[in-house]
Image (cartoon, rainbow, N blue to C red):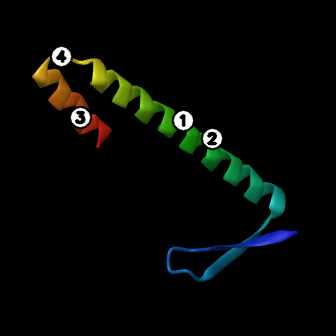
Amino acid sequence: MRFRIADAAGDPAETVPASLAMEALQEIVGVRGAASAERTALINRLATLQSPFLRAELSADCG
């Protein structure tokens, strides 16, 4: 099985083997999971802060 990958304009750019597409998808899923865990840790840290200055600084990081 092969998948088509589109370029930035949406035009089909190339065909890649399914194994490469699955590898890329697994990497994306892993990165998303790590980012979600980091966001949760920041939010939890924010909840425990007492200093208004530090709260403001960390809030900026939580977006």
Q: How busy is the neighbourhood of tag 3: few (under 14 within 10 Å), some, or many (20 plus)? A: few
Which residue is under mark 1?
34
Which of the two discs, 2 and 3, labels the residue nearer the N terminus?
Answer: 2
* Distance in Å between CA atoms under marks 4 and 1: 27 Å
Which residue is under mark 3?
59
Most extreme residue toward the left is: 53
Q: Are marks 4 and 2 in contact (CB under 8 Å)?
A: no
Q: Are marks 4 and 1 in contact (CB under 8 Å)?
A: no
In the image: residue 55, left or right of residue 18:
left
Q: Are marks 2 and 1 in contact (CB under 8 Å)?
A: yes
Q: Please tell me which residue lies in front, 29 or 52.
A: 52
Q: Quadrant of residue 10?
A: bottom right
SS class, disc 1 = helix
Q: What residue do we see at 28% from left, 36% from top?
A: 61
Which of the two discs, 4 and 2, labels the residue nearer the N terminus?
Answer: 2
- On residue 25, which mark appears? none
* Distance in Å between CA atoms under marks 3 and 4: 13 Å
Q: Quadrant of residue 60?
A: top left
* Distance in Å between CA atoms under marks 2 and 3: 25 Å
**Nearer the viewer's eye, disc 3 or disc 1?**
3
* Distance in Å between CA atoms under marks 4 and 2: 33 Å
Which residue is under mark 2?
30
Q: State the image coordinates of residue 30 (x, y, percent, origin top left).
A: 63, 41
**Nearer the viewer's eye, disc 3 or disc 4?**
4
Which residue is under mark 4?
50
- Tag 4: residue type? Gln
**Nearer the viewer's eye, disc 2 or disc 3?**
3
